Image (cartoon, rainbow, N blue to C red):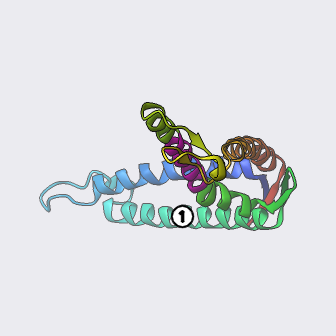
Amino acid sequence: MEPTTTTITEALAEVKLIGKKIGKKQEFILTYLLRGAMVKDPLEKDGGSETIVAREMQAIRDLEERVVKIRTAIAHANATAQLTIGTTTRTVSEWLTWRRDVAPIEKKLLGDIVARVNAAREQARRATGKLTSDAAAAEPSDILVNLSEVEIQTRVEAIEEVLGRLDGLLSLHNARTTITLN
């Protein structure tokens, strides 16, 4: 097979299409996998069920191998291409890992901090105390916040901005980056 060149966007669309083809072939195989010995082979004219099922099994293995080649080529391209967002430069692979594994954890922590501070603020309001970050000026009934709420909000906004910019840059990267498939 002669090498072909395609964009990552096109390759990802092909992976999705291959998934659908595999699903249809699996359905076909399951339909003709078994038949009673007394039942006439419905695929006899086309070479027989056994031959056709074996051929479809091989076709699935070939399609699966195509997916492996596509995903490997994309991974290689993503491991070498770099994107810069703000002052941070990472490979596409690193950005994808950050988006999948780091950003959700940090967003959850920051959301939990904001929720906890808001709940404490409401509790302090009901108890006629106040929420403060100034331990020296705090009254005994006050609740101290050990983080800057402004910094937390700034970090929440920064993560959202990075995620938004990242989505756009990844789409652009996928549309512009070509990979070679054998």
Residue 3 percent across, percent down from the top left: 78, 64
Q: Is residue 2 visible?
A: no
> For residue 128: magenta?
no
With 93 as the anchor, is 82 left or right in this view? right
Q: Is residue 177 visible?
A: yes
Quadrant of the rendered structure where residue 33 is? bottom left
Screen quadrant of the N terminus: bottom right
Q: Main secondary structure of the magenta part?
A: helix
Amino acid type, label 1 = Glu
Q: Nearer the viewer, residue 177 or 42?
A: 177
Residue 177 percent across, percent down from the top left: 82, 53
With 82 as the anchor, is 18 left or right in this view? left
Which residue is at a point 39% across and 60% down the rendered structure image?
A: 52
Which residue is at a point 58% across and 67% down the rendered structure image?
A: 65
How many tags in the picture?
1
Q: Which residue is mark 1?
A: 64
> For residue 116: magenta?
yes
Residue 152 percent across, percent down from the top left: 67, 46
Q: Nearer the viewer, residue 113 or 171?
A: 113
Whether residue 65 is situated above or below residue 143 in the rendered picture: below
Q: Residue furthest left?
A: 38
- Dot 1 lies on which element? helix
Q: Nearer the viewer, residue 175 or 33?
A: 175
Screen quadrant of the C terminus: bottom right
Give the residues in magenta: 104-117
Which residue is at a point 50% across and 62% down the rendered structure image?
A: 59
With 146 as the anchor, is 4 left or right in this view? right
How packed mark 1 is, by other alpha carbons closer than 10 Å (few <14, some 14-19, many 20 or more), is some
Residue 146 percent across, percent down from the top left: 61, 54
Whether residue 171 is situated above or below residue 55 in the rendered picture: above
